[in-house]
Image (tube, rainbow, N blue to C red):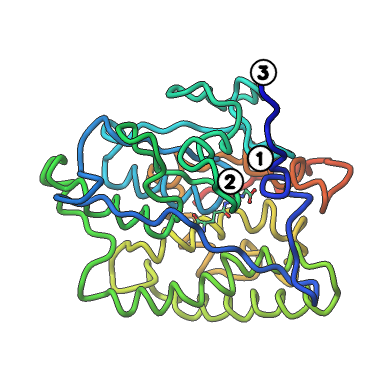
Amino acid sequence: MTAQKDTTEQSDPAKFKLEADGSFKRVDTVFRDFIEKGGRFEPQADRYHLYVSLACPWAHRTLIARKLKGLEDIIPVTIVSPMLGPQGWPFASVDPFPGADVDPLYNSEHIKDLYLKADPEYSARFSVPVLWDKQNHTVVNNESSEIIRIFNSAFNDLLPPEKAALDFYPTDLRSEIDAINEWVYSDINNGVYRAGVANTQSAYEKAVHEVFAALDKVEAILTGKDYLVGDQLTEADVRLYVTAIRFDPVYVGLFKCNIRTIRDGYPAIHKWLQKLYWNNDAFKATTDFEHIKTHYYAALSFINPTKIVPVGPVPHIIPL
Ligand SMILES: N[C@@H](CCC(=O)N[C@@H](CS)C(=O)NCC(=O)O)C(=O)O
């Protein structure tokens, strides 16, 4: 066996790089291709494969979008173990965590093996989600915000009309969706990480106040409304849901986002969250609290060295 190069600078969560002031900045993703007719990546059944962690909020967006559009047969999915470790995300062949899969395509040990197969010189992080092309043995795209747009429209010709007609990024609402996405991303989706991973008091406090100021804004928007934009489910709801569903179980405790909980402090957000979870299976069936809590509390051991996973909140999501 040949010696493998040490890639732990790219894979080990304990080696996350923080900025000089102790704050956390998420690095940009590298593979940014689209699936389109006439392009390098044509829309075809049985050609693409999605790799995800059920724990990861960014990957969770893609699972929801895949199920909302009815793409389950066209794009199979493989789930990694939630135990992100020094070599990154392991498959079940290395860590047989309940609900984790082996890699059906290459029997890889870790997600990083796929990245290095696609590009042996790849030098960024080995993140999920990964949208993989079986034909060219490469990553099409590893940016969840783009993968959900691909799922929204690229396979419409292969779908039954009622699924093809579903549009979660409709033209007339795009500017409003884009505007909400921007601050929801920086202050909520990524804001909780900025609070949780910060290693100075000032970086943490700045981030945590930004998180709650943005939640206050969302609460005002959702008061008397079922969805964030217009009167319909859009990708803006999907993108907020993945953070909101993790908020009370993980971010309040581990990431110290504890000025309020969603269940007790934000009635409109709470009702919106409960309705999505309990009334729409694309949300409930893709939400796995075991993977979520275990990943954050046991695998991010640089924040929680004892790796103890808290029992509560009970229940993880309150019934409607
Ligand atoms: N911009 C990416 C971010 C994905 C991301 O940060 N995923 C995390 C898990 S929540 C990951 O895989 N981290 C592994 C690592 O950085 O080593 C997206 O939205 O798709």
From mark 2 to mark 3, how far is it between C-alphas? 23 Å
Kindly give the residue lying farthest to the front in the view shown. 2
1 vs 3, front mark: 3
Residue 90 in the image: state x and y as whole percent.
Answer: 63, 32
Label 2: few (<14), some (14–19) or many (≥20) C-alpha neighbours in 10 Å: many
The residue carrying mark 2 is 126
Secondary structure of the residue carrying tag 2 is loop
Q: Which residue is mark 1?
A: 88
Of the pair 46 and 29, the residue shown nearer to us: 29
Q: Are marks 1 and 2 in contact (CB under 8 Å)?
A: yes
Q: Quadrant of the N terminus?
A: top right
Residues under labels 1 and 2: Cα distance?
Answer: 7 Å
Distance Cα–Cα, label 1 vs label 3: 21 Å
Looking at the rendered structure, the kind of residue marked 3 is Met
Amino acid at circle 1: Gly
Mark 2: C-beta under 8 Å from nearest atom of ligand 1: yes
Please name the residue that numbered disc 3 is placed on. Answer: 1
Neighbor class of circle 1 (other Cα within 10 Å; few <14, some 14-19, many 20+) is many
Task: Classify mark 1 as within 8 Å of ligand 1 or not, answering yes or no.
Answer: yes
Residue 24 image point, x, y percent: 70, 68
Q: Residue at x 79, y 75 (%)?
A: 20
Write down the quadrant of residue 239 in the picture: bottom left
On screen, 199 above or below 148?
below
Q: Earlier in the sequence, mark 1 or mark 3?
A: 3
- Assess disc 3: are there few (<14), some (14-19) or many (≥20) residues with their C-alpha within 10 Å of its C-alpha: few
**Label 2 is placed on what type of residue?**
Phe
Badge 3 element: loop
Nearer to us of marks 2 and 3 is: 3
What residue is at 70 percent from the left and 79 percent from the top? 209
Residue 116, labelled with which disc? none
Q: Nearer the viewer, residue 218 or 176?
A: 176
